[in-house]
Amino acid sequence: MGGLNHSSVRDQLKVYLVAGTRDCSSPLPHVLNESLSAGITMFQFREKGPGSLEGEMKKALALQLFNQCREASVPFIVNDDTDLAEQIDADGLHVGQEDDDAYEARKRIGKHKILGVSVHTVEEAYKAIEAGADYLGAGPIYATGSKADAEKESGPEWISELRRNGVDIPIAAIGGISQSNGTAVIRAGADGLAVISAITKAGSPYQAVKEFRGLFTE
């Protein structure tokens, strides 16, 4: 099991911005600043794909974004880079099925950091929980252009299936999540909405985040 309180993680997952430099219409620090001001509850730095930053440039940007999150008291999660997460002492790490082993990731970051694991089957969900995941990333729920190697879309039913099979730890739904379909995902049992382009490519990331927050009060 994960080392953190599930109730607090559920609250932190609600409006979960996931982004890297390639995902944004304007500079990522600006997008993050607007999103923090509007009330995102967690941020994941996902710097992947052709043209993405590497090495010291990636680390420097990660530190800048981490400081922005820290000032707003919002957890900063690193995607699939355990070394970077350790170097900057990030609040947590998210790994996929093709990334670092979840057991090893938990061992390296310790029990007091947030560990998220992407899952696509009930069996993967059980294994992630056993490895010490604090939350699961379930998707893609809808078609997405943000991840080139994304699995086939599963729909909100995938969240319901996890719940029916006894998965009771926090779940963040990801993949094509928008203001128009987010409510259906929440009703299916998701604790949070992990969003990329609906915020990062919005004319006003601030307004987009406000709209996502509103889905939890409907």
Image (spheres, helix red, strand yellow):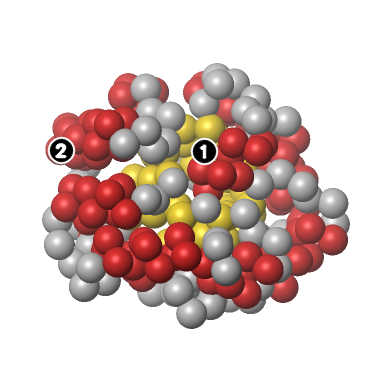
Pointer 2 or 1: first along the chain: 2
Residue 146 appearing in the image: no
> Callout 2, which amino acid?
Met
> Callout 1, which amino acid?
Asp
Where residue 94 appears, x then y in whole percent?
49, 42
Q: Which residue is drawn at 43% across and 29% down?
A: 91
Cα separation between marks 2 and 1: 22 Å
Q: Is residue 122 left or right of residue 40?
A: right
Q: Residue 100, which numbered label?
A: 1
Where residue 38 appears, x then y in whole percent?
32, 54
Where residue 36 appears, x then y in whole percent?
30, 48
Q: Residue 57, which numbered label?
A: 2
> Which residue ends up furthest to the right in the rendered image?
165
Per the image, label 1 sits on a secondary structure element best described as: loop
When the figure is inspected, residue 35 is found, relative to residue 101, above or below; the finding is below
When the figure is inspected, residue 177 is found, relative to residue 47, above or below; the finding is below
